[in-house]
Image: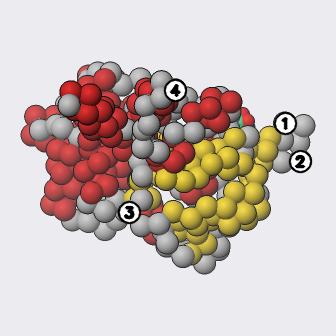
Amino acid sequence: MPITLNHVSYTYAPGTAYATGALNDVSLTISDGEFVGIMGKTGCGKSTLIQLIAGLLTPTSGTVEVDGRDINSPSYDRSLLRRRVGVVFQHPEHQLFETTVERDVAFGLKHLGLSKEEKQQAVRQALEAVGFEYETVKNQSPLSFSGGEKRRFAIAGVLAVKPGILILDEPIAGLDPLGRQSFLALLDRLHEAGTTILMISHNADAIAEHAQRVVVLEQGSLLMDGEAGQVLSENTFLKEHGIGVGQAAQIAALLEAKGIAMEPGTVRYDDLLRQMIAIGRRLQQ
Ligand SMILES: Nc1ncnc2c1ncn2[C@@H]1O[C@H](COP(=O)(O)OP(=O)(O)O)[C@@H](O)[C@H]1O
Ligand SMILES: [Mg+2]
């Protein structure tokens, strides 16, 4: 079990006039190799949740375990966590500060005891994974690239460490459709290679197409947790709670309302298309 939260609560600035309860008694287990989408309205606690998993915040109460160990216990070796869990924060492109792309992507490899060749190899692979040619970009300043390209460098820096668990906070927000597509394809490849992925996103279609499981938070508590098709087809419930509904799920619901029976949990375009083709064929007969 790579990640287990046991009754985790978190309050910012506890005991002050500004105390904000951000998470309230959240229990959650994420298994090896899962691709989990995390949704919920702004301020519901998504970013707090992932910072707790990454060990950047310590629960006010409850425990966070990674690979069966309490990451906040004094005897826990934090360097394990840094290798195991990679976090891509919101707007990671704002965190580039080294003079060359190579140095920036290699930043997280410091103190891992790698040789110069091993580091170079890790940087090369990470840059190639996000679609750059190592030799072309390695000596350039990251600041001379576009926003989308900078974001890919920042992500390469996280991938270079080869984390088994990858957590991403709204990674596709603000990317153009092509950038979004190639980025999500990269996540699929990492997932197929065995990486556990947690992705926060408001984009219900992206989550429907790529995640297997969806966790929805509301005001610091778990509102829903289940298989992606099951959660994302609850259109009425999701809308009532201010959560975006995907296009494919809406089309499926519109067809249902016209008396055309759709398979339960239709939230993906390929599923929708397959059923519409079958319906079309039946009509032609
Ligand atoms: N550094 C902080 N100090 C005080 N309150 C915070 C801080 N960060 C977040 N909060 C509050 O905690 C709650 C959860 O925030 P957050 O986890 O960022 O939600 P989300 O990522 O879902 O938008 C919100 O009420 C937010 O205002
Ligand atoms: Mg957030």
In the figure, 206 relative to 77: above or below?
A: above
- Label 2: which secondary element: loop
The numbered mark, 3 or 2, whose residue comes first in the sequence reads 2
Q: Secondary structure at mark 4?
A: helix
Precedes in sequence: disc 4 or disc 3 = 3
Q: Disc 4 designates what residue?
A: 257
Q: Earlier in the sequence, mark 2 or mark 4?
A: 2
Residue drawn at (36%, 44%) of the image: 210
Q: Find ligand 1 in the image and state its quadrant.
A: top right
In three-dimensional space, the C-alpha distance between marks 4 and 1, rounded to whole angstroms, equals: 47 Å
What residue do we see at 42% from left, 38% from top?
262
On screen, residue 61 versus residue 109, left or right, reads right
Secondary structure at badge 1 equals loop
State whether residue 154 appears in this view. Answer: no
* Residue displayed at 68% across by 66% down: 6
Which percent across, then down, holds residue 8?
71, 59
What kind of colouring is applied to the model shown?
A: secondary structure
> Which label is found at residue 33?
3
Circle 4: residue type: Ala
The amino acid type found where label 2 is placed reads Gly
Could you say which disc has been placed on residue 15 in the image?
A: 2
| Mark closer to the chain start, 3 or 1 | 1
